[in-house]
Each structure stands twice: as structure tokens, then as C-alpha cells.
Image: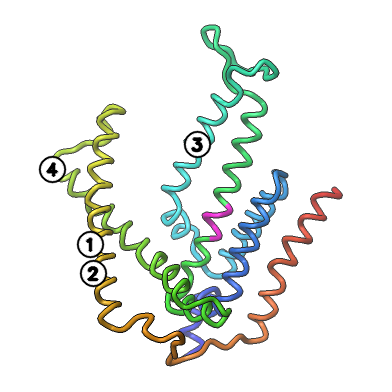
Amino acid sequence: MNENRAIKKGRLRILDPRPKLMLMASASTACMLTSNLWYIASILVVLVVTLLIGGMNLSLLWNRAKAIFMLIIMLFVIQTLFFGMGRADAAPLLHIGGFGFVYTGGILLAAMLSLRLLVIVFAGLILLEGEIRDYLLALVQMKIPYTFAFMVVIGLHFLPILREEATNVYCCMQLRGKDFKKLKLTGKIRAYIGICLPILVSALRRADEMSIAMETRGFRSQPRRTYMRQLKMRGADIALTILFPAIFVGLYFLVKFL
């Protein structure tokens, strides 16, 4: 019975949170410390393979990250078209009406930034495979002050809620006759401002209510807190915690000497 339940949850969900935190931290740090496209692409491949082996469906992966993908594609196009304009040492690959567009340096920079964003997105998706309270316990057991750990966990907890509220506001505006596809750029900006304002007001209201609830329950009244349960790392969790950063270090030297 327990085995069937674990299989339904997926391999990533039954892992201790600390290997997943180590994977996210090491992947994000590694991609930010280098500008080698092949190395950043290899980090991205490791994250995708980890998600697939961990039991995440490709359709679910696409549904969770498609909005970010569209943003990354837009940033890639803008960076490719306009990076290098006005620089005497940059030779454009495309000329339109006497103006130069698409520079080699812009393509390389856009590819690097896009791959970095994808690495950060996929690393964040790994954290979604788990319970929020487990990450709180993991951070506390890693000797991080529980006040800071609580703030991080609350931020992770509110992200899906804010996303759901944004979807609801978007659907309400469509039901009232707002067709986003037919709007011009200025109309889309006004429409998206109309979406952001209710979400901002709702977030402030939730933060105020949560602060009152925390104060009435004596949050931070004692320097130390007790917890009903403790996380225990198994042998596989310890091995993965060591293995993930070792993989990225090994990939760095492999790409460097190829």
C-alpha cells in the first residue's frame, strides 16, 4: 500500500527536501558563474532528465512553464534584434532601410541569458515536487533561523495562489468582453495593469491578515521553536546531496577540456 502510494507521488516527491534544495542551488549557481553555452545547456539537460526520471509528465511540465517560455522567447528576439545597435565594432547580419539588426554578439548573449533563465525555471519546478512544510523543516534543520525559513516558505506558498487569482481576473475580463488578441499595444498595457492591480491589493490584504494571525499566535515570542516531526535523510538522500554538485563540477571540466 505504501509502495503504491509512493509510486503515485513520484520519485521526486518522496525525496528529502535537502537534495532538491542542493540541486536547485548548485544548478542556479553554476549557470550564473559561467558564460559557456555548452556548459549551461548541459546543466539544463541534467535538470530536464532529473524531472523526467522523477516522474513529472511532459504535458504537466509544459503547462507549468509555458508562460515563462513565451517570455524567454520574446526576450531572446528583442536581445537578438537590438543588441549592438550604435556600436562601431559590431557588424549587423541584417539590414533594413539603412538600419542594422541581428548581431552575432546579440545572438550569443541572448542564447546565454535564455539558457540561464530556463535553468532557473526548471530548478524552481523541481521544488514544486514536494510539500511546502517539508521545505520549512529542511531549512530549519539546516540551521537557518526559522524566521527567515518561514518567510521563504510563505513566498513559495503564495506563488500558486497569486497565479490562480491572476487567471481568475483574466477570465473575468474576457467574460466582460475584453478580447486581448484584438487589443493594440497600449490597450494591452492598460489591460495587464488592470490585472496586476487587483492581485497587488489581494496580496497586501493577505499579508496584513497573516501578520495579524501570526502576532496573535505568538510568532517569534520564543527564540527557539519545537516541531511535531523531524526529517530524516536516508542513504539515497545523502548520496544525491553529494552527487548533484559533483555532476555539475564534472560537467564543467568535461566541457572545458572538450
Dot 2 or dot 3, earlier in sequence: 3
User: Regarding mark 2 in the picture, which secondary structure is present there?
Assistant: helix
User: Regarding mark 1 in the picture, which secondary structure is present there?
Assistant: helix
Report how far apart the C-alphas of labels 2 and 1 lie in the structure: 6 Å
> Is label 2 in contact with label 1 (beta carbons under 8 Å)?
yes
The kind of residue on which mark 4 rests is Arg
Residue 238 in the image: state x and y as whole percent: 67, 81
Residue at the disc numbered 2: 209
Q: Nearer the viewer, mark 4 or mark 2?
A: 2
Task: Tell me, yes or no, whether the highlighted magenta stretch contains residue 121.
Answer: yes
Q: Looking at the image, which residue is at 45% across and 42% down?
A: 70
Task: Tell me, yes or no, whether the highlighted magenta stretch contains residue 174.
Answer: no
- Pointer 1 local density, CA inside 10 Å: few below 14, some 14–19, many at least 20: few
Q: Which residues are magenta?
A: 119-123
- Pointer 2 local density, CA inside 10 Å: few below 14, some 14–19, many at least 20: few
The kind of residue on which mark 2 rests is Glu
> Is label 2 in contact with label 3 (beta carbons under 8 Å)?
no
Q: In front: 81, or 57?
A: 81
- Which of the labelled discs sits on residue 176, or is there none? 4
Secondary structure of the magenta portion, mostly? helix
Q: Looking at the image, which residue is at 66% across and 28% down?
A: 105
Q: In front: 226, or 69?
A: 226
User: Regarding mark 3 in the picture, which secondary structure is present there?
Assistant: helix
Q: Is residue 123 left or right of residue 249?
A: left
Residue 126 in the image: state x and y as whole percent: 53, 65
Q: In the orientation shown, which residue stands out farthest toward the right?
A: 257
Q: Is residue 176 left or right of residue 213?
A: left
Residue at the disc numbered 1: 205
Rendered view: 89 above or below 107: above
The kind of residue on which mark 1 rests is Arg
